């Protein structure tokens, strides 16, 4: 099973700043079949990025994903107040899905 | 508009059973695999189970294998999660999700329900 480790645990930023979130896999992610989700308090997660770098429908272009192998990054270019949330990475491999433990952006 | 509505959560004693339902609308149900993902209070997301569009193929996390069973009724556009031998550590919000991506449409979850809370306690 591939383990995903996200860092930092918490990111404290101000509106307009750039946010850089990391997701490291315990072994290389094939594809890469890696996604990022946003979860606001009391809400279900929302798919932001899939295949490591493709924005899902309706996602603003200030969100971008990059990476390959074992190291992946979600970047929010100019943070807006509505972006305050927990962000999770997720991978698919051999009929098994795993999530990282999350990064809280506050 | 895609809608997923979970139901069936509640309070159950350790060792007991619950059956969750997820009613889907707004898309061709049989075209998509469906999954259950849970979130313990204050914790992260954990994938639990996935079922193919036909219902013929199922997948389970090790943490629930042998205790939980996923199924679907394509005539009713509903997916189920039968949970037996419940434990305190099964306490969580259970989300229903629609799978998408990859050559077999399994890789990610692009629509989610609002979740249903399962509490296992004596």
Image: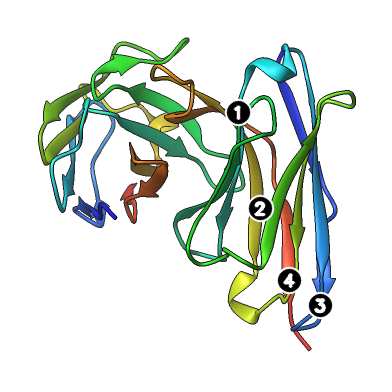
Q: Quick check: do tags 3 and 2 share a chain?
A: yes
Give the residue number, with chain letter if any, for mark 1: B33
Point out the frontmost of discs 4 and 3: 3
Which residue shows up at 20% across the image and 22% down it? Answer: A77
Q: Are marks 3 and 1 in contact (CB under 8 Å)?
A: no
Chain letter of the residue beneath label 4 in the structure image: B
Residue A41 locus on image (x, y percent): 54, 47
Q: Quick check: do tags 2 and 4 share a chain?
A: yes
Of the numbered discs 4 and 3, the one sitting upstream in the chain is 3
Element at label 1: loop
Q: Are marks 2 and 4 in contact (CB under 8 Å)?
A: no
Give the CA distance from mark 3 to mark 1: 28 Å
Give the residue number, with chain letter if any, for mark 4: B119
Of the numbered discs 2 and 4, the one sitting upstream in the chain is 2
Q: Quick check: do tags 1 and 2 share a chain?
A: yes
Of the numbered discs 1 and 2, the one sitting upstream in the chain is 1
Of the numbered discs 4 and 1, the one sitting upstream in the chain is 1
Chain letter of the residue beneath label 1 in the structure image: B
Which residue appears farthest toward the right when viewing the image?
Answer: B76
Give the CA distance from mark 4 to mark 3: 11 Å
Element at label 4: strand
Q: Nearer the viewer, residue A31 or A82?
A: A31
Of the numbered discs 3 and 1, the one sitting upstream in the chain is 3
Give the residue number, with chain letter if any, for mark 3: B16
Residue A21 lies, with reference to residue A33, above or below; the image says: below
Element at label 2: strand
Give the residue number, with chain letter if any, for mark 2: B94
Task: Please identify the quadrant where the N terminus of chain A is shown.
Answer: bottom left
Point out the frontmost of discs 4 and 1: 1
Q: Quick check: do tags 4 and 3 share a chain?
A: yes
């Amino acid at each position: 099973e591939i383990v995903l480790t996200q860092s930092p645990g918490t990111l404290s930023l101000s509106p307009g700043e750039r946010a850089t979130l990391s997701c490291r896999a315990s072994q290389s992610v094939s594809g890469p079949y890696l996604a990022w989700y946003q979860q606001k308090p009391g809400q279900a997660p929302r798919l932001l990025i899939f295949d490591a770098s493709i924005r899902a429908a309706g996602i603003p272009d200030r969100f971008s994903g990059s990476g390959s192998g074992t190291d992946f990054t979600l970047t929010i270019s100019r943070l807006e107040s509505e972006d305050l949330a927990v962000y999770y990475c997720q991978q698919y491999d051999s009929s098994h899905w795993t999530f990282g433990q999350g990064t809280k952006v506050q | 508009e895609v809608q997923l509505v979970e139901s069936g959560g509640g309070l159950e004693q350790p060792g007991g059973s619950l059956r969750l339902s997820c009613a889907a609308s707004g898309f061709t149900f049989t075209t998509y695999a469906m999954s259950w993902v849970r979130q313990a209070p204050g914790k992260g997301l954990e994938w639990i189970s996935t079922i193919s569009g036909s219902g013929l193929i199922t997948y389970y996390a090790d943490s629930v294998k042998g205790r939980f069973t996923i199924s679907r009724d394509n005539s009713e556009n509903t997916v189920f999660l039968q949970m037996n031998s419940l434990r305190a550590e099964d306490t969580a919000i259970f989300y229903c999700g629609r799978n998408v991506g990859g050559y077999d449409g399994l890789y990610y979850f692009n629509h989610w329900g609002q979740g249903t809370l399962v509490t296992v306690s004596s």
